[in-house]
Amino acid sequence: MSAGERRWGRRERGRGRGRGRALLWCALVAAWELAWGQLRYSVPEEMQKGSFVGDVAKDLGLEPAALRARGARIVDKGRRQYFALHDRTGHLVTAERIDREQVCEAADECVLRCEVIAAGEMKVYAIEVEIRDVNDNAPSFREAETELKVSETTAPGSRFPLAEAQDPDSGRNALQRYELSGDEHFGLAVQTGLDGGKQPELVLAKALDREEGAFHELVLRAMDGGEPARTGTARIRVVVLDANDNAPVFSQAVYTVRVREDVPVGSALVTVRATDADDGLNGEVKYIFQKISDVAAQMFQLDPEAGEISLSHELDYEESSSHELGVQARDGGGLSDRAKVVIAVTDVNDNAPELTVTSSRSAVSEDSAVGTVVALLHVQDRDSGANGEVRLSLGAGLPFRLRSSLGSYYSVVTARELDREEVSEYNVTVRATDGGSPALWSSAVLPLRVLDVNDNAPVFGEARYSAWLPENNGKGALVLRVRAADADWGQNGRVRYRLCEGQVRGAPLSSYVSVHAETGALYALRSFDYEEVREVGLWVRAEDGGAPALSSNVSVRLFIVDENDNAPQVLYPAAAAAAGAGAGAGWSGVELAPRSAEPGTLVAKVVAVDADSGQNAWLSYELAKATEPGLFRVGLHSGEVRTARLPVARDAPRQRLVVVVKDHGQPALSATATLHVVLAESVAELLSELSGAAAPGEPAGSLTRWLVLAVAAVACLFLAFLLALLALRLCRWRRSRLLAAGSGASRAAPASPFVGIDGVRAFLHSYSHELSLTADSRKSQRRCPGASGSNTLPAPPPPDKRAPLLPEEPAGAGAGSGSDSDSGDALPL
């Protein structure tokens, strides 16, 4: 291997190590910027549309598919969109050709900023792209030809300012040097100003002689430092004049004026003034712009005669806050002077804040945690100072707040828990207000829908329900409807009803009632009987369709309303089968009424009950039929049969009374009770009357048989009594004869329950009935105590009758049978 090849290899290895170190440094810088949430790239200007700028997906550590899934997009801070994000690759590319000189004008460093918005995560990543200058502009002079008048008396070494060349490029690509060619009388000097600009000056190297040459042609070249270098030229024609002793002199070297950006077009901004001590043509001064940018040349105009600089185009502080102009004053003899004019533009609050919704949600769940991001906003104001200070605010009373994010980005987050049942939709108005006077503002409206969560259980319209259902209802009758409302929405608010488990009289509750799952209607599945079931208690459950489902219960009381479906039932007199082939069951009884009874004397009492309740069980009694209509009356509510007047001789001994018992139902039901009352003063008369023929229309065979049997029984008893008495007397007589006459006395016969009247003996009882009647007919009771009978006669025998064979009962034996008690003397048949 030759020495040259070895040197070449060492150089290549050195370049490789240098490139490796550069790549490592770039990787470290990129990692540092990514850690701070910022990416930085550098590209040259004038790249084609769609040119690669940087791999955003890789630098953010994401796959391109993940970047798409997060809804990433590019937002430029300026008015124009210079960059775009490639959907498939995740690369940052140019959206158009970028001209550095147009975008950044004379700035030393041109940096464009944009953001990557990840809408899915509500995150922002800042990107800075440095636009590197390329040598795409050659230096140029405003005037391709310039005429310079110089007096022949001008001393060598005199300097004449020349127009500067303009090069919009920067750095090495900007203007670097001037060259002059064409004549030995003149040379070139370049002065460096305070701002770094290079000011060319024409230097008179040799005295002029108008007679030798009235004109001199020169060429001024301006060259930049690009590779290859670009050049601009201007031709200078020097006219040799006669002597001009004095050059114009400006009153100020620098004119500074401050104007508002909203000054009207055509307004005079400043007037420059230069004086010349010469007379005539040599003293006439004219003004021109010696150094001015293309933008300033369109905005300002200079009156060459008066030196007044006026505004020819609207100012914009946001585009440029100051303008620097070079003004030259030249007299008629070709002498000149220079001055600088600085126009400082004062900001006016002429730009409202620009509020942009970069990402937002259309809906948020009501159970979202506090601090959930619902929108990402970007705000900027092109004004400066207080005019550019923007303050964001939300509408009052909203459950949201603003949170500062990266730079001029803000997040709208939830400030408290949301409740869809309280507010289901929000129109969140965000207002951006600057600090100007008067303040300017802009706003954006964020429509937001609150998604429902099953957080509300059904609520019944009433704390408890009750209904009244008449008994004997039809199967499937509607009882009532229960209603439950659920404040949730959709399936979470759909309510279904069902019965809770229970029993009624040992049977499942579901066999009595059912509830419609959708409407909440409660139906009776069977016919109710008030006498069996008077009240049904149950629970209805309302359950929504959420997951998990929420439910609530309500108590329902079903009251069975009594109907008049039970006729009164007669308890006394007792029921007996009707004789013969009559109309079925009837009522019969025999009561004794003394003919000497006073009006109002209790004869008998009809006792009846009704299985119904309330008004349907209220009973009333009335006398429907009587043998003697005016002799007896019946208590309307007590059922007591009393004498209405004194019986008279013409009144039939046997009275038949038919009592109708009615309830107060609608319609009323009734039952009848038949009483047989015998008008007699004694039991003998009663028996005599009973032994007679039956009353017309009454069955007589049965009564006769019972009377015959009663008379036979009494006769037998009487005969046995006589025989026993005779035997007793004989025994006593015999004993007295054996012992001593008069030593023993006959003892009185014990009292007997039997009485004898005209050879007829009867066994009499008095019955007392104790009744307990209540509003609830099922609880009414009847007691017939065994000790209630007493062996009494209703009245002593009349004086003209013979005394009974047996001794009378003691005086107090019949004290318990008063007329006001529910008792009467009756002969059981």
Image: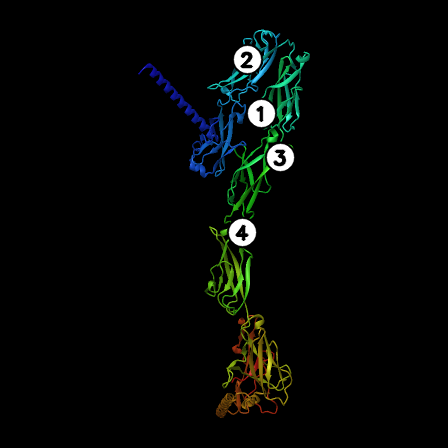
Observer-side mark, 1 or 4, equals 1
How far from the left and from the top, in percent, is residue 210? 60, 8
Q: Using the image as rendered, state which of residue 140 and residue 672 is in the foreground.
A: 140
Q: Which residue is rendered at x = 38% and y = 22% of the image? A: 16
Label whose residue precedes the other's in the sequence (1 or 4)? 1
Observer-side mark, 3 or 4, equals 3
Observer-side mark, 1 or 3, equals 1
Q: Residues within 10 Å of mark 3 (few under 14, many from 20)?
A: some
Q: Is residue 204 above or below residue 432?
A: above
Label whose residue precedes the other's in the sequence (2 or 3)? 2
Mark 1 is on which residue type?
Answer: Val
- Determine the CA span between mark 2 and mark 1: 29 Å
Label whose residue precedes the other's in the sequence (2 or 4)? 2
Mark 3 is on which residue type?
Answer: Leu
How far from the left and from the top, in percent, is residue 399? 56, 42
Residue 218, numbered circle: 2
For the question of whether residue 625 can be seen, the reply is yes
Q: Is residue 618 above or below residue 206?
A: below
How far from the left and from the top, in percent, is residue 412? 54, 39
Q: Which residue is mark 3?
A: 440
Q: Which residue is mark 1?
A: 295
Observer-side mark, 2 or 1, equals 2
Q: Which residue is mark 4?
A: 487
Q: Residue furthest right?
A: 279
Quarter of the image for the N terminus: give it. top left
Observer-side mark, 2 or 4, equals 2
Q: Residues within 10 Å of mark 2 (few under 14, many from 20)?
A: many
- Determine the CA span between mark 2 and mark 3: 57 Å
Label whose residue precedes the other's in the sequence (1 or 3)? 1
- Determine the CA span between mark 1 and mark 4: 66 Å
Q: Using the image as rendered, state which of residue 185 and residue 622 is in the foreground.
A: 185
